[in-house]
Amino acid sequence: MSVFAETQRLAKQYGKTRILEEVSIRIDEGSIVGLLGPNGAGKSTLLKCLLGLIPYEGQCRVLDQDPRRHRARLMREVAYVPDQSCLPLWLTVERLLRLVADLHPRFSLERAHHFLAETEIRDSHKLSQLSKGMRVQLHLALTLAIDSRFLVLDEPTLGLDITRRASFWKQVLADYCDGKRTLIIATHLMQEVEHLLTHLILIDRGRIILDQPFEAVLERYSRVVPRPGQEEALRALHPVSEQEILGQTVFLFDGPPRSELGRHGTLHRASLAEIFETATRRRTP
Amino acid sequence: MNAVAFRLFALVRCELWQRIRFRRRLGMVAGGAALLGLLGTGFIALFTPVLGIRIQPGVTAPDGAALFMIVGAIGLVIVLIRVLGYFMHALFDERLDRSILFWQSLPVSDTERVAAKTATGLFAIPLVNWAYTMMIAAILLFFLSLSTSLMGHDFWGSFWQPVPLLSVIVFFGVFFPVFMLWLFPVLGWLLFCSAWSSPRRRRASWSLAIGVPLVLGILEPILTGTHYFGDWVQLLSGPFGRIWHLALLSIVRWRNPTGALWATLGWMFTRPEFWLGGLVGLGFSAFALYLLHHHEPPN
């Protein structure tokens, strides 16, 4: 499988604050990567480094190019939604679409109009008059109208209501999850993306704390509801967490064979939120 | 049109969308000029018969080209202010409104963006303003002719003077952008300051833009006893003063020194400072590009 992006000891510092430290990751083409981490973990900064938007230390190659030097060329292949509203507010929707159509060789005006037809956004609207949610919808419509092999989404659904979020992810699933396109999603809303992911990267305080195929992560973490009297046996296997939920004890394990755990209780798939919480809690001093 | 030229065209058009509200401006310019002309004509229509003013035989109608000259000279002041302001904000506004991330997410290089902004300031804004200026002059000439026809002149007399009106119109169409090229060292400096500026050091960038030339102008004669900077400023503002001088002459004497106008333009092209200044402007633009490339987008 060819590589979409690879970093070696990537680091980034703002003033005296180190945002990224020794980040070495590899993202294969065709994978759908979830980049998760708490606030300020360095997710957006890592994405900006990958796309050549900011200077960095260390090595970074995207599509076998230096993203810093060849950002414009890279952006022909990559569609990117940043985590903050950044559309030029002085444009009208119609002019914005014309502009992107003129500047992006893979942009389809027809597709953009198709997506916008499902919203209340009209061509004559000025961007400054749109609500925050409408601007997000517009930006997502612009991005989805780009026929790119690589899509980088940084908190893409922030500001969208639940219906629009569902509709957006449905569209992403239909367009991008075909095994040929690469998708990197940085988000806090884990339950929205966990059914899409093929690879998981967890980042905390600028360091990668987990970088594995999603199937392997699910294999590694198990949620166990003990059979009566089996609690102590499970505790002996060193669970990473133990919780009381509705009067029932629930254990979360990282590592022990599922067959062994199965002897003491009922196995469940650990949720992404549980894995995330466990992995980040372990690093807390 | 090749891809790069097409992208540059799209970027320049977008810059104009941002900087010039075409419809509103057109309405204001045409409406304002028409109102002014209408008031003048109404005044003449009202008072000429009362005062019994008639044009003496042998007196020719006012020169329309002279009117275009004075309106063109005023237009030059306006375009100068607009272009100076444009270059001061060109690379800063996108960081202030955070749209820089949008621009960077498009397949457009920093070089193309700086080139588009430079072309907008040097050519597109001057030419748009030239069109507005000439439109105002045309509207005013219409009302001037109407007024003088009320006093007994031929309505078309101001249009068909010996000095060709078209020559003045074309002259300003060439002069507006050429004068901006003449000022390219200053404009390039402002572009550099706008690239250096950030929301946190906005005032500092203004101080840099204005303060450095000011200090240089004051300190050079004191410290070295030379006047190179002052001479250079004088040379730089020379064509501007020359155009105003000719415009005022044309109004006072009601005749148009078109030849002198074109001679001014020719003089500019033959000056080595014109080409040297172009190189300096390019140098500042290159520094601006460097800063733009190394700037962090806002968090």
Image: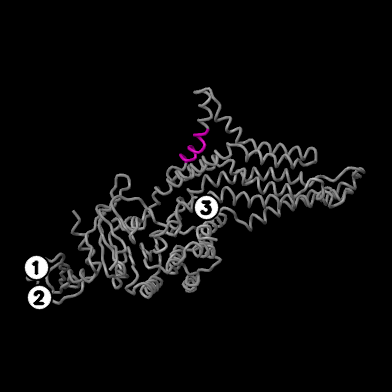
Give A112 or B45, whichever is nearer the viewer: A112
Q: Nearer the viewer, mark 1 or mark 3?
A: 3
Q: Mark 3: which amino acid?
A: Ala
Apparent side of residue A109 relative to residue A217 in the rendered image (left or right): right
As drawn, the label of residue B116 is 3
Quarter assignment of residue A280: bottom left
Apparent side of residue B164 relative to residue A58 in the rendered image (left or right): right
Marks 2 and 3, how far apart at CA: 69 Å
Circles 1, 2 touching at the beta carbon (< 8 Å):
yes
* Marks 1 and 3 on same chain: no
Bounds of the magenta segment? B203-213
> Which residue: 35% across, 74% down?
A173
Residue A10 coordinates in the image, percent (x, y):
28, 53
Q: Main secondary structure of the magenta part?
A: helix
Give A24 or A284, whichever is nearer the viewer: A24
Quarter assignment of residue B277: top right
Marks 1 and 3, how far apart at CA: 65 Å
Residue B290 belongs to magenta span: no
Residue B202 coordinates in the image, percent (x, y):
46, 43
Residue linked to disc 2: A264
